[in-house]
Image: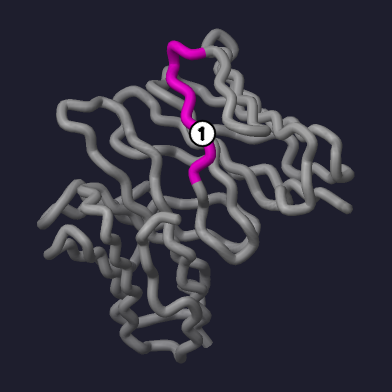
């Protein structure tokens, strides 16, 4: 499977700390996307990074992509309790007609 | 917030019943998807559609069926529900870019949590 794999599976931090999640994948990609899912809700798209980009920012989010290592990281700076959610990476792989989602990282931010 | 709606949000029903989960979007998106997700677990794609009259099976084999008669509507049907169908079902949609070779971000509904007794 060319599915993305997130690491760690779960992360627990205090408010104000930074949270870093990683995603690894197996095949060449067109782009890689990160999503957030709050408990009992659907996924919300956060950011898309294309294969020719190395870094992208959106507010407190910073995404990096290393195509040589087939990996991406999502950094959330100055975490808040409201950031508590599961975070999924999704790969748009060449030749595939749909996105493939990873297993997700559960982030718990304590006040 | 994305304009994609799923009904019902929760459904508890007995074995053997026929069930239809509704999904509608008002964004005019061509592509639509159904995922199955157990709590805290990964998403599994069970069906998708490129547009009207198009339906494709996803990666996870499912006894459900789908139809796409209108752009905005993508219902999922289980002819005879069983306890193994208990799960959360998420519907999503995305734009398709003309001549594009890559997948646009998906917009998700809040899901239907299905329990079969």
User: Magenta-highlighted stretch: main secondary structure?
Assistant: strand
> Looking at the rendering, which quadrant does residue A72 occupy?
top right
Q: Position of residue B20 (x, y in %)?
A: 31, 78
Looking at the picture, does residue B110 appear above or below residue A27?
below
Q: Position of residue A90 (x, y in %)?
A: 49, 36
Q: Position of residue A89 (x, y in %)?
A: 55, 36
Let me know if residue B28 is in the magenta part.
Answer: no
The quadrant in which the N terminus of chain B is found is bottom left
**Kind of element beneath mark 1:** strand
* Side of A4 where B97 appears, left or right: left
Residue bearing the label numbered 1: A47
Q: Which residues are magenta?
A: A45-53
Looking at the picture, does residue A80 appear above or below residue B36?
above
Q: Position of residue B104 (x, y in %)?
A: 34, 36
Judge by depth and name the residue closer to the eye, B39 or B70: B70
What residue do we see at 27% from left, 42% from top?
B95
Looking at the picture, does residue B35 appear above or below residue B77?
above
Chain for disc number 1: A
What residue do we see at 47% from left, 83% from top?
B11
What residue do we see at 54% from left, 13% from top?
A54
Rate crowding at label 1 as few (under 14), some (14 to 19) or many (20 or more) other CA atoms within 10 Å. Answer: some
Let me know if residue A52 is in the magenta part.
Answer: yes
């Amino acid at each position: 499977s060319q599915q993305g794999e997130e690491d760690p599976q779960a992360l627990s931090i205090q408010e104000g700390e930074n949270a870093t999640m990683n995603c690894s994948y197996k095949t060449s990609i067109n782009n890689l996307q990160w999503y957030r899912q709050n408990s009992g809700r659907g996924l919300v798209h956060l950011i898309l990074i294309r294969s020719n980009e190395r870094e992208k920012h959106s507010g407190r989010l910073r995404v990096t992509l290393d195509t040589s290592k087939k990996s991406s990281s999502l950094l959330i700076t100055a975490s808040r309790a409201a950031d508590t959610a599961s975070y999924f990476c999704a790969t748009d792989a060449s030749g595939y007609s749909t996105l493939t989602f990873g297993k997700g990282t559960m982030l718990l931010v304590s006040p | 917030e994305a304009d994609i709606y799923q009904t019902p949000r929760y459904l508890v029903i007995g074995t053997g019943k026929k069930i239809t989960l509704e999904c509608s979007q008002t964004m005019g998106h061509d592509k639509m998807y159904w995922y199955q997700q157990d709590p805290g677990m990964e998403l599994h794609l069970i069906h998708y559609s490129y547009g009207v009259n198009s339906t494709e099976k996803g990666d996870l084999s499912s006894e459900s069926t789908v139809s796409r008669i209108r752009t905005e509507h993508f219902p999922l049907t289980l002819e005879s529900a069983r306890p193994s169908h208990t799960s959360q079902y998420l519907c999503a949609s995305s734009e398709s870019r003309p001549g594009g070779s890559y997948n646009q971000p998906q917009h998700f509904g809040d899901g239907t949590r299905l329990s079969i007794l």
